[in-house]
Every structure is written in structure tokens, then in C-alpha cells.
């Protein structure tokens, strides 16, 4: 008889699992931007090539049925954490080398595929290992620790790199920072190998008797795209983050660029504090509050207010680019307000994806949702650097704010059940 535990206190693994989910994504999509900017890569190249790194998250629905049908979610989680730890160490080795840009991009690309696969397995494991009421109870904590992982990357690691830059040079500082993250991630691998439970439901999804792998693979996608109102669903998934998709690649270059180039002239350490610490803490606060208010009144009540609020703080960057304030406290406060509003409003997007994913193939359907989200981030992000260099920061931020109208129009087409997301009495 097996002695493997089928359940375990969620506090023992949910926080660390979602930190492990958040760290590689943050390193690939956010910290890479800061690192390349400090290593003198142009804004256009940064935006174009790091936006391509979204592609694994875009196409991950193509192999999400494979994760469902081959081996267990636990197997995929532990395996990918080992791969990601090795990839982080490989980037650390490549940074000081000649042609670092090509080498690190290639490793980031492989790392993105591993991270996307880990996401599929972790989100599926969460739904299989917890009862429905536990899933609702821990959805806020899941988001919270994902945001803590973002703080660890965009805040602590960037501050560490900025501090080391002053003593050892930029390349060696960032190499050391990536070695630190690699060690942390390999510790997650060891911890989860022994601590994650073995849920009874965590078994390969069996196909319908008499059907083959390909038939079951295709039916998973068909069951998602033949649903009613799929057009409105797709529009919302693609457009909700339209403004962020353009901003995310240019916020840190804007903070780092010299004032005569239209930026704010912050140091690497100051960016780590303003955007990676104050910003992330406010993002956490907004996310916790957003989840709580949805649990009180439901997603239907909060959907439109949250869509409006996610776009409003773009005005902060218009003001910052026009006035270029010298006060670091004021800059940090503006970034904090923007991040709080985004964290608060993103709760609606998360709940919408959970709602859309309900059904027999919830792991694969949630992966499809997140893949579409990544597509909505990738395409606008690819051209955002060239647009910024063409328009300048002032006009670029104005254009981003105007584009908010598309997300609002998409939200107006969405239908949400009256009680969805509301905590049961």
C-alpha cells in the first residue's frame, strides 16, 4: 500500500507553487527588459525581441492537452522546475560572454517554453488538489504569492543587480543576480519534489474509448471555440490588457532613460525600489482588494468598473513624461497608484478566465485563455518600442491611453452570471 499523501495542507505548497510560477515569467518578461536596457540594447530591439518571448505562452494551448494526457501534473511541475533552474544558471553564464544578446535570448526562449508548461501543470494541479471551496479560499493567496514572486524579481533582484553594478560592473552584476535566482529556483524544485501531495484525481486524462490521441486533442479545442458568444469572449481576452501590452516594455526604459531623452533618469537601484518594490506592493494590495470585493458582490457587478479603472492610471505616465518630476518619492507614488489600479482590476480578468474554463477540460481551457491573453500582450508589445522611438515618450503614453476604448467596448459585450464569483453564505 502506497504511503504517498493524497492531500496536504494547502499552506504547505500553494504559496511556493505560485511563487515558482511567477518567478520565471517575471525574469523572462520584465527583468530581461531592465537587464538589456542596462547593457545598452535599444528600446526598439528590447520591445521587439522580448515581445517574441510571449510566444510560448501564446501557443501553450497547443500542448496543454499533452500535459493533460501524458503523465501527472505533479510530474510536469517538478520536471519543469529543474529545467528552469538550469536555464537561469545558463543565462548567468552567458551574460558576460561576447554576443550575450543572442545567447541569452535563445536561453530565455527555452525558459519561456518551460515556464509556460509549468503554468499549465500548476494551474491544473491547483484545481485537482483542492476542493472547490478551497480553490475559492486560496485564489487570493495564489495571486498574492505570484505577486510576491514578481517583487522578488523586479524589486529585490533588480536592487541587488543595481548595488553590484557600482562595484563589479554591469555584466558581472547581472550574472551574479541570475545565479542567485537559479539557486532559489532549484530549491523550489527540491522542496516540491517532497512536499507536493499526490491527489487521486491527478492522473492522465483518458480519452473517449475507441478514439485516438489526435481526436481527443482536437476535441479539447473544439469544445472551447464552439461555445456561444465566443466572439465576445475572444475580444475581451485579447483587448483587456491592450494598454499594458504597450506600456510594460517601455515603463522601465522610460524610468532609466536620461532626461534629455524624455525619461526620468533613475538608477537601476531606484527602478528596483520604485517599480519593483513600491509598485509591486501596491499591485499586491490592489489584487487582494480586488479579489475581496468580487467575492462580496460578484464579477458581474465589478466587471465594468474594473475595466475602467485598469486604464485610468495610464494618465500617470502622461503626467510623468510631461513634467519629468525630480522627486523620487513623487515618481514612486505615481507608479504605485498605477500598479494598485492594475492589480485591483486584474482580479476581474482572472475570474473571467476561471468562468470561461469551467467544464471537463478545465486545465486545457484555462491554458487556452492564458494563451490568448499572451497573444494580446505579444502583438502590440512587438511594435511598442518602434512607436515610442517614433513618437517620443509623451505622445506614446497619450496613444496608449486612447487605445483603452477598445477594451471597454469588448467588456460591454460580455455576459456574466449574476452570482458568479460571489462567496456563498
Image (cartoon, rainbow, N blue to C red):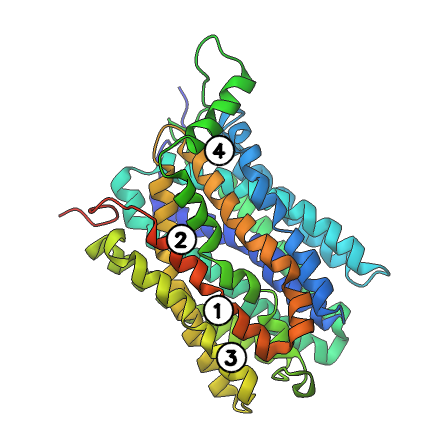
Please state the horizontal and vertical placement of residue 189, each as a whole percent of the image.
Answer: 56, 45
Please state the horizontal and vertical placement of residue 396, each as a whole percent of the image.
Answer: 59, 73
What residue does disc 3 label? 318
Compared across the picture, whether 47 is left or right of 324 comes to right
Q: Secondary structure at mark 1?
A: helix
Whether pointer 4 and pointer 1 mark residues with C-beta atoms closer than 8 Å, the reply is no
- Identify the mark at residue 312; answer none if there is no mark: none
Measuring 63% from the left and 49% from the top, which residue is drawn there?
A: 85
What residue does disc 1 label? 402
Q: Is residue 37 above or below residue 80?
A: below
Please, which residue is most extreme toward the right here? Answer: 98
Give the class, few, some or many, for how many residues have Cα within 10 Å of label 4's Cα (few <14, many ≥20).
many
User: Disc 1 and disc 3: Cα gap in Å?
Assistant: 11 Å
* Foreground tag (1 vs 3): 1
Please, which residue is most extreme toward the left here? Answer: 425
| Residue 268 visible in the displayed image | no
Amino acid at each position: 500500500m502506497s504511503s504517498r499523501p493524497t492531500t496536504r495542507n494547502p499552506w504547505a505548497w500553494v504559496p511556493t507553487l505560485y511563487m515558482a510560477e511567477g518567478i520565471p515569467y517575471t525574469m523572462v518578461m520584465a527583468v530581461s527588459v531592465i537587464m538589456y536596457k542596462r547593457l545598452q540594447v535599444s528600446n526598439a530591439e528590447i520591445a521587439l525581441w522580448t515581445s517574441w518571448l510571449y510566444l510560448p505562452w501564446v501557443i501553450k494551448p497547443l500542448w496543454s492537452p499533452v500535459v493533460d494526457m501524458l503523465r501527472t501534473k505533479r510530474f510536469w511541475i517538478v520536471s519543469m522546475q529543474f529545467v528552469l533552474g538550469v536555464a537561469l544558471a545558463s543565462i548567468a553564464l552567458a551574460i558576460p560572454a561576447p554576443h550575450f544578446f543572442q545567447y541569452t535570448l535563445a536561453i530565455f526562449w527555452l525558459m519561456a517554453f518551460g515556464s509556460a508548461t509549468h503554468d499549465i501543470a500548476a494551474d491544473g494541479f491547483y484545481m485537482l488538489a483542492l476542493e472547490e471551496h478551497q480553490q475559492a479560499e486560496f485564489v487570493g493567496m495564489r495571486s498574492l504569492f505570484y505577486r510576491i514572486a514578481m517583487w522578488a524579481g523586479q524589486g529585490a533582484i533588480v536592487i541587488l543587480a543595481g548595488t553590484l553594478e557600482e562595484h563589479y560592473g554591469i555584466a558581472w552584476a547581472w550574472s551574479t543576480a541570475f545565479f542567485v535566482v537559479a539557486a532559489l529556483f532549484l530549491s523550489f524544485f527540491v522542496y516540491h519534489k517532497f512536499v507536493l501531495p499526490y491527489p487521486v484525481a491527478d492522473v492522465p486524462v483518458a480519452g473517449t474509448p475507441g478514439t485516438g490521441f489526435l481526436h481527443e486533442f482536437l476535441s479539447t479545442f473544439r469544445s472551447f471555440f464552439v461555445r456561444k458568444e465566443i466572439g465576445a469572449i475572444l475580444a475581451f481576452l485579447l483587448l483587456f490588457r491592450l494598454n499594458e501590452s504597450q506600456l510594460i516594455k517601455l515603463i522601465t526604459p522610460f524610468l532609466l532613460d536620461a532626461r534629455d531623452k524624455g525619461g526620468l533618469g533613475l538608477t537601476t537601484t531606484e527602478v528596483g525600489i520604485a517599480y519593483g518594490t513600491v509598485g509591486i506592493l501596491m499591485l499586491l494590495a490592489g489584487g487582494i482588494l480586488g479579489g475581496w470585493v468580487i467575492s462580496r458582490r460578484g464579477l458581474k457587478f465589478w466587471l465594468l468598473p474594473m475595466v475602467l479603472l485598469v486604464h485610468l492610471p495610464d494618465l500617470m505616465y502622461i503626467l510623468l513624461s510631461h513634467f519629468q518630476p525630480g522627486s523620487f518619492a513623487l515618481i514612486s507614488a505615481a507608479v504605485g497608484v498605477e500598479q494598485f489600479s492594475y492589480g485591483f482590476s486584474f482580479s476581474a480578468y482572472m475570474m473571467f478566465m476561471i468562468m470561461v474554463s469551467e467544464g471537463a477540460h478545465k486545465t486545457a481551457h484555462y491554458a487556452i485563455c492564458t494563451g490568448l491573453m499572451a497573444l494580446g500582450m505579444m502583438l502590440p508589445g512587438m511594435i511598442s518600442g518602434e512607436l515610442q522611438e517614433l513618437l517620443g515618450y509623451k505622445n506614446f503614453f497619450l496613444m496608449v491611453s486612447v487605445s483603452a476604448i477598445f477594451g471597454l467596448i469588448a467588456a460591454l459585450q460580455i455576459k456574466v452570471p449574476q452570482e458568479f464569483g460571489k462567496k456563498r453564505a
